[in-house]
Image: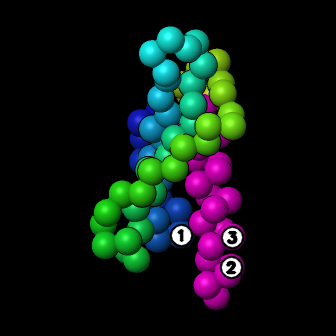
Amino acid sequence: MKDSIHYKNCLIRGDSFQFAQSNGWIPRYTLMSDQSDGIPSHHDRLDKVFSTQNEADKFAVRDAMRWIDEHCRLQG
């Protein structure tokens, strides 16, 4: 995937990875927002494994959106 998505003043990038000796892909997203001073924040979901990088990235982006929604609700 490696595409960036803008969502509620944040930039999300699916950055899933594969362990060297594993066939599965671990979802990871990089999240940048105005509040983080442009410093990327990486979040890995080690409890999830997908068969393709695209599937893992799609999950990672949805997970990032869910996190943003919950975080904004708590801040608002």
Q: How is the image coloured?
A: rainbow
The structure residue drawn at horizontal position 68% and vertical position 79%, both measured from the top left corner, is: 73
Q: CA distance from mark 2 to mark 3?
A: 5 Å
- Give the residues in magenta: 56-76
Please state which amino acid type lies under the numbered disc 3.
Glu
15 horizontally vs 75: left or right: left
The residue that disc 2 covers is 73
SS at badge 1? loop
4 horizontally vs 50: left or right: left
Please state which amino acid type lies under the numbered disc 2.
Arg
Q: Nearer the viewer, residue 34 or 42?
A: 42
Q: Earlier in the sequence, mark 1 or mark 2?
A: 1
The structure residue drawn at horizontal position 66% and vertical position 27%, both measured from the top left corner, is: 49
The stretch drawn in magenta includes residue 18 = no
Q: Are marks 2 and 3 in contact (CB under 8 Å)?
A: yes
In the depicted structure, whether residue 20 falls above or below residue 10: above
Disc 1 packing (10 Å; few <14; some 14–19; many ≥20): few
The structure residue drawn at horizontal position 45% and vertical position 15%, both measured from the top left corner, is: 20
Q: Is residue 58 visible?
A: no
The residue that disc 3 covers is 70
The x, y position of residue 76, in whole percent, is 64, 88
Q: CA distance from mark 3 to mark 1?
A: 12 Å
Q: CA distance from mark 1 to mark 2?
A: 12 Å
The structure residue drawn at horizontal position 30% and vertical position 66%, both measured from the top left corner, is: 38
Query: As drawn, which residue projects farthest toward the bottom?
Result: 76
In the depicted structure, whether residue 56 falls above or below residue 63: above
In the depicted structure, whether residue 56 falls above or below residue 61: above
The stretch drawn in magenta includes residue 64 = yes
